[in-house]
Amino acid sequence: MFDARLIELFHRYSLKGTFHLNSGTLGDEGYIRAQAVPELYRGMEVAGHSVTHAYLDRIPRHLAMREIWEDKRNLERITGRTVRGFSYPFGEFGEEAAECLKRAGLEYSRTVRPTYQFGWPHDFLRWDPTCHHNQVSDELVGHFLNPPDYEKTLLFYIWGHSFEFEREQTWKHFEEICEKLSGHADVWYATNIEIKEYIAAVRNLVLSADSDMLYNPSAQTVVVENRGNIVEAEPGKTIRIP
């Protein structure tokens, strides 16, 4: 159970993570017991990964739906929190899997297709990460922390598995990455669902015809920059844009 060591690392450097769990393996040899999940993942996000880590596009649709729905249901009962995200087992998915997630009320799902870039996802049910933790380079870290002036609100999304650090003996290397990325006042450290909520709030902002007023219909405060002026658009409020 290497998630515990990874979470300790995240806490040490004030980072956050989203952990995708297979509810059907909890309690098996080498896996955490269900009763220990709420405390271990406190401060982190728990998301779905199917009950048995099934190939969702290689099984009948009703079984794929059961894998997704029952995993969500099990994890919500265990954690006492709503489960709103997912990641595709084996990184494999198609239109049917994405549709099953949508019908089950899941709001996003992470793929394993690296972009090596820092853009926002266009489709949350096909959310491509920046890279795997083995692919993090000094160049990527440097670009993220010191981007050119024309690049704004970069998203650095690193994915992977905690058991890989043990198998490949890369704990020390990943801790060095955590240390480089931590402690920056201009960086927001967030879980997947926090990022999804914020981006959705930004995309739902309502701008007046003269572009001098902004209405925020969401429950999320949004920071807006216009001509060097930074203002906060509070939930349910209309603000003047300087």
Image: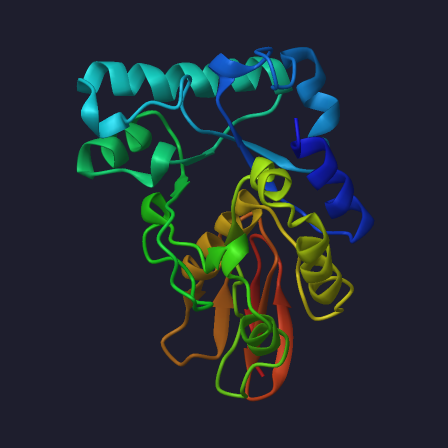
Figure quadrant of the C terminus: bottom right
Looking at this view, is 77 or 135 the one in front?
Answer: 135
Q: Position of residue 75 (x, y in %)?
A: 54, 19
Q: Is residue 43 toward the left or the right of residue 196 in the image? A: right
Q: Quick one: quadrant of the N terminus?
A: top right
Q: In the current view of this chain or complex, which residue is farthest to the right?
A: 12
Q: Where is residue 111 in the image (x, y as percent from the top left)?
A: 37, 46
Question: Residue 66 in the image: x percent, y percent?
Answer: 32, 14
Residue 211 x %, y %: 43, 79
Tell me which residue sits at (49%, 68%) in the image.
214
For this rendering, which residue is in front, 82 or 189? 189
- Residue 64 seen in the figure: yes
Q: Is residue 106 above or below residue 242?
A: above
Snapshot quadrant of residue 122: bottom left
Residue 94 occupies which quadrant of the picture?
A: top left
* Colouring of the image: rainbow
Residue at 19% x, 32% y: name it.
Answer: 96
Residue located farthest toward the front when viewing the structure as drawn: 168
Q: How many marks?
A: 0
Residue drawn where x is 20% and y is 20% of the image: 59
Q: Is residue 198 visible?
A: no
In the image: residue 105, left or right of residue 97: right
Q: Residue at x 69, y 64 (%)?
A: 181
The relative height of residue 91 versus residue 63 in the rendered view (above or below) is below
**159 w.r.t. 18: above or below:** below
